[in-house]
Image (spheres, helix red, strand yellow):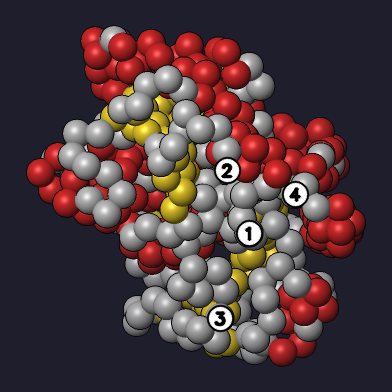
Amino acid sequence: MEASQTKNRHDGVLSTNARVMIDARYLNGNASGIGRYTEHLIRHLLDVDDRLRLALITDRRRPRPIEHERVDCQTFYGAPNSLSTRFLLSRCVDFSGVDLFHSPFNVLPSKLPVPAIFTLHDIMWLIDPSYCTSKRWKRLITGTYYRTLIPRSVREAAAILTVSQHSRQAIAARFPDAEKRIDVTYNGVDPFFRPVPPGEGWPLLNQWLVPKSRFVLVVGQGTPYKNHVGALRAFVKAFGDDPHTYFVMVRRLHGGADAELQQILDDRRLNSRVIQLDYVSAAQLRALYSLATVFLFPSLYEGFGLPAVEAMACGTAVVSSDRGAPAEICADGARLVDPEDTGAIADALQQLFDNPKIRKRLEQRGRRRAQRFGWRFCAHRALLMYRRVLSR
């Protein structure tokens, strides 16, 4: 199937007079990394290419998440990462007039009537399921789901997008036959994430912190690869006897503290200095990023590592992992440490807290580094892949 193409007057790429279907069910009102990726991709595709038309598959909770004259929506009631996506979607969704299908999350439906691409953010479930969950039953059930459907999706996809060179290399090593079909579209940073003046930020945080509090910030879902246990251990090592330094953890999808984390939280020295938040608004998150003394991101594995880049964009010094995607993405914009070395993390935190000059230099480098990642460029790369597949 071939779509007519003309030169885009804005970006120097070929505009695609095509209708692309995107599975947008992660735009369901719940905050998630894939949801942000999906929303920004859609909005910037429409901006980059003024002829592209989109058909969205949406969640029943938000049947029309994006209002635009070149966007049509239809609802599919199954959950995104479910067997219904794989085996029912292609039979229940109307593909009339659709030229290409794009799934922005890790699996493809089977028996699609049009060429398909998907975004494979990472292959953690294939490399080591213990990164993703500590629950044996979940490693068995969810692990089987991904071990079965990711390889099938890779075989069936006309092209594969991923979000870092590290992820690209891992996917290519696992699936050598797919190497030439993989391209990188880095995540971007929303311009919303920028430094917030203290006078504007502290009132948003006054239910948890008093103004001018010194605190370490951690943001991420409560899964093992985020290494929250290691982060808290390092905080205790660095500031266990400092009653004026706090640890703030925005930690969704955790289902309560696991035994190891709870054991650390029982340390009497911490008292009320560990603040755990299940949910914060976007404005509160930006204020937390901006007013944190240091943002800590000691992940054991990542496909990209968007919170670290958002923190850098807000002008905060970042301590991040020295391996994989975090090291690639943060580069010299963060202090890189071994995420499994509690002492190294603690030393980095203490140095940045104790030396404002070093912290200021790191803040400046981080802001420059964050400017390299834009959603417009992500959409630009995706559009080039659409064009490549449509032209075959």
333 versus 216 height, above or below: above
Residue 153 at x, y percent in the picture: 80, 59
Residue in the picture at 46% in, 73% down: 29
Residue under label 1, please give it: 255
Q: Return the residue found at the far left.
A: 199
Q: Secondary structure at mark 3?
A: loop
The residues tagged by marks 2 and 4 sit, at their Cα atoms, a distance apart of 22 Å
Residue that numbered label 4 is attached to: 133
Asked if marks 3 and 4 touch (Cβ < 8 Å), the reply is no
Residue sitting at 40 percent across and 37 percent down?
Answer: 273
Quadrant containing the N terminus is bottom right
What residue is disc 2 on? 163
Secondary structure beneath label 4: loop
Circle nearer the N terminus (2, 4): 4
Where residue 266 sits in the image (x, y, percent)? 57, 38
CA gap between label 1 and label 2 equals: 28 Å
Tag 2, which secondary structure? loop
**First in sequence: mark 3 or mark 1?**
3
Compare marks 1 and 4 and give the one earlier in the sequence: 4
Crowding at mark 3 (Cα within 10 Å: few <14, some 14-19, many 20+)? many
- The tag earlier along the polypeptide, 2 or 3, is 3
> Residues under labels 3 and 4: Cα distance?
26 Å
- In this figure, which residue is indicated by the disc labeled 3? 59
Nearest to the observer: residue 343 or residue 21:
343
Residue at 78 percent across and 83 percent down: it is: 88
- Front position in the image: 73 or 131: 131
Crowd rating for badge 1 (residues with CA inside 10 Å; few <14, some 14–19, many 20+): few
Of mark 3 and mark 4, the one earlier in the sequence is 3
Q: Amino acid at mark 3?
A: Asp
Q: CA distance from mark 3 to mark 1?
A: 23 Å
